[in-house]
Image: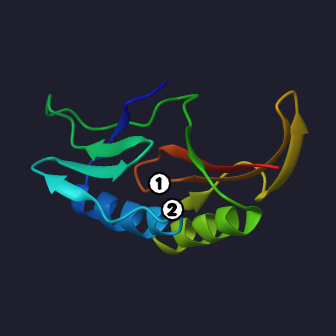
Amino acid sequence: MFSHIMIGTNDLDRAKSFYDTLLATLDVPPARVDGHRIFYMTKTGVFSVSKPINGEPASAPNGGTIGFAASSPDQADAWHAAGLAAGGTTCEDPPGVREGAQGKLYLAYLRDPDGNKLCALHRM
């Protein structure tokens, strides 16, 4: 459904360090730098972080979440731990199983250093 997702940052070097560490837990190679943007290329799509081209400060969306697929609860836990160690902050409930209309999911939430809300999701 999606070709790419791009979010903003106010510090590209900090964002690259954070996301290189975080996404390595999901077997995603380090970002390719392209001027004011970084790109994580996978077979299923592209995740990018950019300094805003209009020169205004980047801000996190209110109500927005970027979800990353995890292959297991252990991988989601490793993702969460790596994100915290790299400068992210925990949010929502602790990582764990949630049940709802979508079935049983293992979810781990955190915010990146710019405040963007992220989730690692494993469908059980």
State the separation of the CA atoms marked 2 and 1: 5 Å
SS state under label 2: loop
Q: Nearer the viewer, residue 121 or 45?
A: 45
Q: Which residue is at the far bottom?
A: 85
In the rendered structure, the answer to whether residue 48 lies left or right of residue 26 reads: left
Residue depicted at 28% across the width and 59% down the height: 31
Give the colour scheme shown. rainbow
Residue depicted at 64% across the width and 55% down the height: 70
In the rendered structure, the answer to whether residue 18 lies left or right of residue 51 reads: right
Q: Mark 1 and mark 2 in contact (Cβ < 8 Å)?
A: yes
Please tell me the numbered disc located at residue 88. Answer: 2
Circle 1 crowding by C-alpha within 10 Å: few under 14, some 14–19, many from 20: many
| Upstream in sequence: badge 2 or badge 1 | 2
Q: Which residue is mark 1?
A: 112
Residue 65 horizontal/vertical position (percent) = 56, 36
Whether residue 114 is visible = yes
